[in-house]
Image (cartoon, helix red, strand yellow):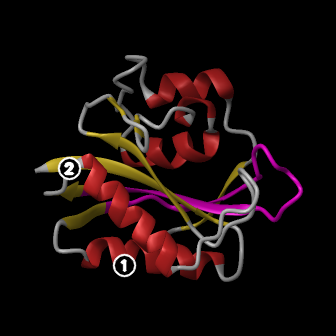
Amino acid sequence: MNEAYISLGSNMGDKEEALRHAVALLNEHEGIHVLAVSSIYDTDPVGYEEQDVFLNIVVKIETTLAAQPLLEVCQKIEQELKRVRIIRWGPRTIDLDILLFNDEVIETDTLSVPHPRMHERAFVLVPLMELDKAIALPTTKRTVREHLQEIGDGGVRIYRSF
């Protein structure tokens, strides 16, 4: 059995419903079991800032899938929820990113785990730390808490419990 953390974000349409629907679709997959879901966080956009605020969560799952098939499931959920990629870091109905997969470091043409910029993004670190305060990134050997202390949690606000 594999353990993974997935970040989900939305800033178009009914954002909260998009997050709830995506989590339900993950949990409905026969090879995935959602173990925990963070609170929902209201977060300022990063990169392209001329867009609505995001709602973000992190989910902890156990899965019989390997990392690449898990990525394919995440992309299929994005398609089902009408994800369109127009502007890099731009508005989206839903975004699913594999943050961590066991303690593995994975680099392929389509998948980088740990997510390459997660240690720079409070909107990922804050909900991840809610689920596991002691988890460390296999690439930096530093905990999520240490990374968050370095960058701060600005622009990330608790929205409500999931």
Where residue 140 sits: x, y (%)?
43, 17
The residue lying toward the viewer, choosing from 3 and 146, is 3
Task: Characterize the local packing of mark 1: few (<14), some (14-19) or many (20 or more) Cα atoms within 10 angstroms.
Answer: few
Q: Which mark is residue 149?
A: none
Residue placed under numbered mark 1 in the picture:
24
The residue lying toward the viewer, choosing from 71 and 19, is 71
- Label total for image: 2
Tell me: residue 10, above or below residue 44.
Answer: below
Name the residue located 36 percent from the left edge and 49 percent from the top edge. 5
Residue 18 covered by magenta stretch? no
Name the residue located 38 percent from the left edge and 48 percent from the top edge. 131
Q: CA distance from mark 2 to mark 1?
A: 20 Å
Q: Which residue occupies the extreme top position in the image? A: 141
Q: Which mark is residue 66?
A: 2
Determine whether, in the image, residue 9 is placed left or right of residue 70: right
Residue range of the region highlighted in magenta in the rendering: 36-61
Q: Is residue 162 visible?
A: no
Decide which of tag 2 and tag 1 comes sooner along the chain. Answer: 1
Task: Characterize the local packing of mark 2: few (<14), some (14-19) or many (20 or more) Cα atoms within 10 angstroms.
Answer: few
Tell me: residue 68, above or below residue 72.
Answer: above
Where residue 75 sits: x, y (%)?
44, 64
Q: Residue 69 occupies which quadrant of the picture?
A: bottom left
Residue type highlighted by circle 2? Ala
Q: Is residue 81 visible?
A: yes
The residue lying toward the viewer, choosing from 26 and 110, is 110
Residue type highlighted by circle 1? Ala
